Image: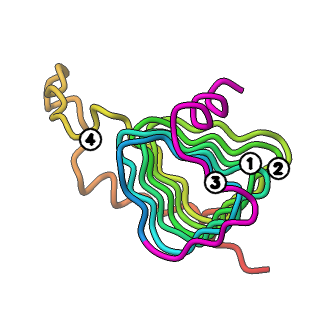
Amino acid sequence: MAIDNVARSEGSHLGKTIHFKGDISGGDDLSVDGEVQGSIQLPGQIVVVGPHGNLSAEIQAREIVVHGKIKGNAKAQDRIEVSRSGSVLGDLAMARISIQDGAFIQGRVDIRVADAAAPRPAASAPAASLPPPAAASAQPQQPSFLDRKP
């Protein structure tokens, strides 16, 4: 994969035998095959969690690729990719996501479009065509699949 090669050749690499406790920040891409406890703050960079990587960390990066394990929340400005060998136990927030068959994710997935913060233009339909709020709330609520009890 091209991202693996970029992170390893032009960035920093923590090998399988490295155990790191603390906060990581900087301006280089990062590839982790060891253990990290703490936080990784590389907002404009790529973080690759290698197949032997085991992170108990909050991660913020431009892109995050997971082949190993993450226990903690991950936030990417662009995308998160979880490969078939990857697992994430925590919430994910990103603009795009790729999840391969066999990947494990337990947590919330929040897909945020980059332009979501920008105000949207007003609807062009006349206000009279919208149902009044009372009519919408007068209809009975359908039970959700998630509301069922086992």
Where disc 2 sits, the SS reads loop
Please name the residue that numbered disc 4 is placed on: 131
Please name the residue that numbered disc 3 is placed on: 32
The span from disc 4 to disc 2 (Cα, nearest Å) is 48 Å
Counting from the top left corner in percent of width and height, residue 24 is at 43, 62
Quadrant where the C terminus lies?
bottom right
Q: Residue at x 14, y 31 (%)?
A: 127
Counting from the top left corner in percent of width and height, residue 9 is at 59, 31
Where disc 3 sits, the SS reads strand
Specify the label residue 67 is tagged with. 1
Where disc 1 sits, the SS reads loop
Q: Residue at x 47, y 66 (%)?
A: 58
Quadrant in which residue 116 is drawn: top left
Quadrant where the N terminus lies?
top right
Circles 2, 1 touching at the beta carbon (< 8 Å)? yes
Earlier in the chain: of badge 1 and badge 4, it is: 1
User: Dot 3: within a 10 Å radius of its alpha carbon, few (fewer than 14), some, or many (20 or more) residues?
Assistant: many
* Amino acid marked by disc 3: Val
Is residue 11 rendered to the left or right of residue 135?
right
Please name the residue that numbered disc 2 is placed on: 85
Q: Nearer the viewer, residue 13 or 46?
A: 13
Q: Residue at x 24, y 35 (%)?
A: 130
Circles 4, 2 touching at the beta carbon (< 8 Å)? no
Residue numbers of the magenta segment: 1-22
